[in-house]
Image (cartoon, rainbow, N blue to C red):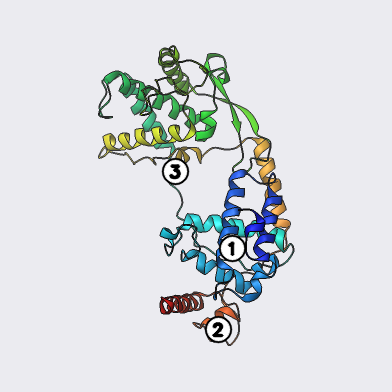
Amino acid sequence: MTPKQYKAASVRQLAAVVDGMAGTVSEGRVRQLRMVVGMFDRAVGREEMPGRASRSAEQLFTSVALGSFWDLAVDGELRARGRDMGVRLPLATQQVVLACLRLLADRVVPGREVRLPVLPAPAPRATTSRDQEAAVFRFMVDLAGQAPVGWGGQSKEVNRLYRLRLLALTAVVLDTRSRAGELARMRVQDLGEGWASVRVVRHQQNGAHLEPVEVVLPLGQEARVALGRWLEARAGLVSGVEGTRDALWVSVAASNRGELPGVPLRAQWIGSSYARGVRWLNGVMAGRVGWEPLPDRLEGLRRAWVPPAEVRVREARAEAEVAARPPRRPTGPVAGPVQHGREYTYNVLECRCGECTESATNARRARRAARR
């Protein structure tokens, strides 16, 4: 949807701001920002939103307009698809919308204190301990040469290849803390002599506009052994595949689309293959003394990675820029002798305590129910 197609002048101005941000943020973030513009387009003109919100983009970032927009968005009233209308936004999507609002506020009303919603802190993601990492590697080394169990429906040879690849993949991740996308970009020629190192090209999350950082990371003895076994098996897989044959990680079985084994793995395939292997491993190890179930996402292994100096310097600069910005007024209850738990206190006095927020939300829901 182009800016000219939005009905309100404020939303058209906001869309133009997002168009101007292309190239300064990642393509994924631009898509998220445009999603938020569409949500504003569906919000402006509703009775919950102040009438002046349609006049200019600056009016969208007043406390009253943002508060009403946020409540409508969280309640699922601004979804693009009609069948999803009224389905509450999950916390992860709320975090995306909030991050987009923060970016837009910095550009639409620079220097102004904008009261943004506060989300509850998410539960920490599961990560692995050093003891878990050592245990999983020892166990998988033993399995690599054993008769296969699990992975039903596959031949013994395919099961063996799955394990060889999972062993090598996990070993490389434990030593490099690489993301799935970084693993997918690895080539055989990225490996150093004797497989003692690997070249990794790191891209900052939400930083497609930033230069990637290329690092050469050492690999331990376990990873070298695992890679040696995998490369020997990989050579047979890619021998009959036309085209690019230098991808380090390739498929070991024919796909449902009819693709032959030996096809380079995309990032999502690497993530799903690892998840399947770890779920199987957790099932095999269940009940063993000292075993703790492993997180079934590569992210759980990667989070212990210490970035190289170049990345740490770049991230420190970004944090310093954020710290230098003028502080925003904290969100919370209004001080003084006011009566909380009223929609008036929420809308007019701009109180965002739990009582006032709940009261305003219930009032809006009651009005919507009365209109139906």
Circle 2: residue type: Tyr
Counting other residues with Cα less than 10 Å from the Cα at mark 3, is it few (<14), some (14-19), or many (20 or more)? some
User: Any mark on residue 218, and which?
Assistant: none
Mark 1 to mark 2: distance in Å?
25 Å
161 lies left or right of 305? left
According to the picture, the residue beneath numbered tag 1 turns out to be 41
Task: Say which of 176 and 72 sits in front.
Answer: 72
Task: Say which of 368 and 156 sits in front.
Answer: 368
User: Any mark on residue 344, and which?
Assistant: 2
Q: Badges 1 and 3: C-beta atoms under 8 Å apart?
A: no
Provide residue 133's location: percent of width, then percent of height: 41, 34
- Tag 1, which secondary structure? helix
- Tag 3, which secondary structure? loop
Circle 3: residue type: Thr
302 lies left or right of 100? left
Location of residue 86 with respect to 163 vertically, above or below: below
Provide residue 368's location: percent of width, then percent of height: 45, 75
Which comes before the other along the chain, label 1 or label 2?
1
Determine the residue positioned at 61% across, 81% down. Answer: 349
Counting other residues with Cα less than 10 Å from the Cα at mark 2, is it few (<14), some (14-19), or many (20 or more)? some
According to the picture, the residue beneath numbered tag 3 turns out to be 127
- Tag 2, which secondary structure? helix
Task: Say whether residue 41 is visible.
Answer: yes
Determine the residue positioned at 57% across, 51% down. Answer: 32
Which comes before the other along the chain, label 1 or label 3?
1
